[in-house]
Image: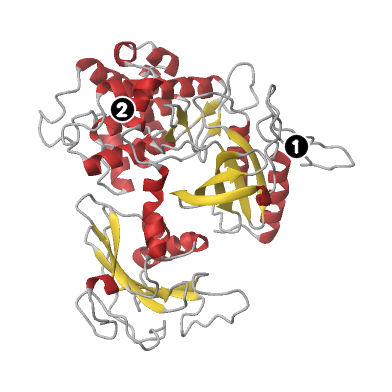
């Protein structure tokens, strides 16, 4: 649920108080400034004559989208006063569906971290209805980008990354985790998608969206364990799932072990199952291993005993039996197999996708002829791809019904249409969904796709729609929630109509009947 305007305004004021750049977080509580007034601007490292990181959008040139999440979009960018590349994470405060406290904690966590293996945070500020976080740009993307790129272009049946590459990358991750844990942080979402790689082989932990403080040293003002259910299920430690005794930084060690499996096999254990099934399997089964998802016993035989032993030690259900990050840095696997950054430049950076390759999908979507209906289908690699009806057929058949669905020229049915039979309970069967809405040129079109409950999430579908240029980023959250409502609480009409900004200009009168400023989801 979105925050109220007053909550957004209050949060914006508090965010402004945190916009101190790479220095310490500080607030002034004097009578002149009042609570939340910053005592200084962005700080500047000693020994440099560059200007501080500016706190105004006009000073940045926003470039390609390089990452899309359920609540934020990440752009490559250029800071004009500093003549320096950076990344901008843009969060729409009006669409923010988590508490503002969580957002402010993320900023606080990033601003207090200064380590070469933790993503660098420069400054943050509010621009219109968005919060902009200015971060270091790591041009090679995430390890997830890299392993997906390799799996798409090479035969990886017997393993994606070799032991030396895994050891070199994960040793750097451990250094970052050691720093975070020693300074009172639990990351709570360690996975390949949150480990970034720079052009010179730098490895940094990113995305503090679910990170938390944990008491460490003499600071007893913070809780010694957490009870919040956050993270990604496939990587989530059992104690985080159970919510009985709470958890501490050892939860990150479990996620680290799962990530090791992910880098070797290409996927996390249980990745094919829906979230609740993942929770059940994790709690009921023995801890997963490298061979848990193998097609046969010989599939991952290239990986040795020390690597498997390291994974096993991390994936102990009893957190007290898991090693710390410091202890893992002394593990035989990392001591024998770990290499240097130059090695990563040769193995990962050189072979991984460039920024241009990562944004090509978005650019292609923007370059397509607008105004066509079409469908989403999965390719053999399991990735979503958009197929326009205009691409499939030389003739325009949009007025002709077909087995895949049709785009009639008359206005769409509304919720008052004759009711269809009530939907059967959702099981594992795929669901045929039609999204009817106006494109940016205000032309009415159908987008057809199959929703597979065992594989898909509503947030994932909404993100794919955004990535392919079919909806605006401000509509991602409402698209995901409306699709979830249609699937989980199917109305008798099997149709849901809701407000959107795509294909609608401010100042126009929204019209639900003609879907001007509205979109419609229906189950076929």
Q: Residue furthest right?
A: 32
The answer to whether mark 1 and mark 2 are in CB contact below 8 A is no
Mark 1 vs mark 2: give the one in front: 2
Quarter the N terminus occupies = bottom right
In the displayed structure, 12 sits above or below 242; it is below
Q: Quadrant of residue 404 in the image? A: bottom left
At mark 2, the secondary structure is helix
C-alpha gap between disc 1 and disc 2: 40 Å
Q: Residue at x 67, y 47 (%)?
A: 59
Which residue is drawn at the image coordinates 50% and 70% (left, top)?
A: 500
Query: Is residue 449 in view from this perspective?
Result: no
**Which of marks 2 and 1 precedes in the sequence?**
1
- Residue drawn at the location 46% of the way across and 20% of the way down: 175
Q: Is residue 338 above or below residue 211?
A: above
Which of 187 and 21 lies nearest the eye of the viewer?
21
Work out whether residue 301 or residue 397 is closer to the camera in this orientation and state it: 397
- Residue 251 appears at what percent x and percent y? 42, 28
Q: Which mark is residue 347?
A: 2
Instruction: Please name the residue that numbered disc 1 is placed on.
Output: 41
Q: Position of residue 433 (x, y in %)?
A: 30, 69
């Amino acid at each position: 649920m979105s925050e109220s305007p007053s909550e957004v305004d209050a949060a914006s004021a508090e965010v402004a108080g945190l916009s101190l750049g790479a220095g310490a977080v500080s607030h002034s509580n004097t009578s002149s400034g009042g609570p939340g007034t910053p005592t200084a601007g962005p700080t500047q490292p000693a020994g440099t004559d560059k200007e501080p990181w500016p706190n105004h959008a006009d000073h940045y040139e926003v470039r390609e989208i390089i990452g899309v999440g359920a609540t934020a979009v990440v752009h490559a960018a250029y800071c004009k006063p500093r003549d320096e590349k950076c990344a901008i994470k843009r969060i729409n405060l009006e669409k923010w569906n988590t508490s503002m406290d969580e957002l402010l904690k993320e900023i606080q966590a990033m601003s207090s971290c200064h380590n070469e293996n933790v993503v660098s945070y420069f400054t943050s500020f509010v621009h219109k209805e968005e919060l902009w976080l200015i971060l270091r740009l790591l041009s090679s993307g995430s390890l997830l980008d890299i392993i997906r790129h390799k799996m798409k272009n090479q035969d990886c049946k017997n393993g994606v990354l070799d032991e030396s590459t895994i050891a070199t990358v994960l040793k750097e991750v451990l250094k970052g985790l050691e720093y975070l844990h020693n300074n009172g942080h639990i990351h709570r979402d360690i996975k390949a998608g949150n480990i970034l790689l720079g052009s010179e082989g730098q490895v940094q932990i990113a995305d503090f969206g679910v990170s938390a403080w944990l008491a460490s040293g003499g600071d007893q003002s913070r809780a010694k364990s957490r009870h919040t259910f956050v993270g990604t299920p496939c990587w989530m430690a059992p104690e985080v799932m159970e919510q009985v005794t709470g958890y501490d930084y050892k939860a990150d060690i479990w996620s680290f072990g799962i990530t090791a499996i992910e880098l070797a096999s290409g996927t996390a254990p249980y990745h094919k199952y829906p979230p609740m099934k993942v929770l059940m399997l994790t709690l009921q089964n023995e801890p997963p291993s490298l061979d848990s998802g193998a097609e046969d016993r010989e599939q991952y035989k290239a990986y040795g005993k020390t690597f498997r032993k390291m994974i096993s030690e991390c994936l102990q259900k009893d957190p007290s039996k898991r090693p710390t990050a410091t202890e893992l840095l002394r593990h035989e696997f990392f001591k024998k197999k770990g290499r240097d950054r130059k090695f990563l430049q040769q193995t990962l950076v050189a072979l991984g996708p460039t920024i241009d390759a990562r944004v090509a999908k978005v650019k292609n979507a923007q370059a397509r002829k607008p105004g066509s209906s079409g469908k989403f289908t999965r390719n053999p690699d399991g990735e979503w791809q958009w197929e326009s009806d205009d691409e499939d057929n030389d003739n325009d058949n949009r007025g002709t019904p077909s087995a895949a669905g049709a785009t009639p020229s008359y206005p769409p049915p509304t919720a008052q249409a004759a009711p269809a039979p009530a939907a059967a309970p959702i099981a594992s069967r795929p669901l045929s969904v039609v999204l009817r809405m106006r494109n940016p040129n205000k032309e009415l079109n159908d987008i057809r796709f199959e929703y597979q409950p065992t594989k898909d999430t509503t947030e994932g579908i909404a993100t794919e729609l955004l990535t392919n240029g079919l909806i605006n980023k401000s509509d991602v959250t409402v698209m995901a929630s409306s699709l979830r409502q249609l699937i989980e609480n199917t109305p008798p009409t099997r149709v849901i109509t809701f407000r959107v900004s795509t294909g609608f200009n401010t100042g126009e009168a929204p019209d639900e009947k003609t879907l001007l400023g509205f979109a419609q989801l229906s189950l076929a």
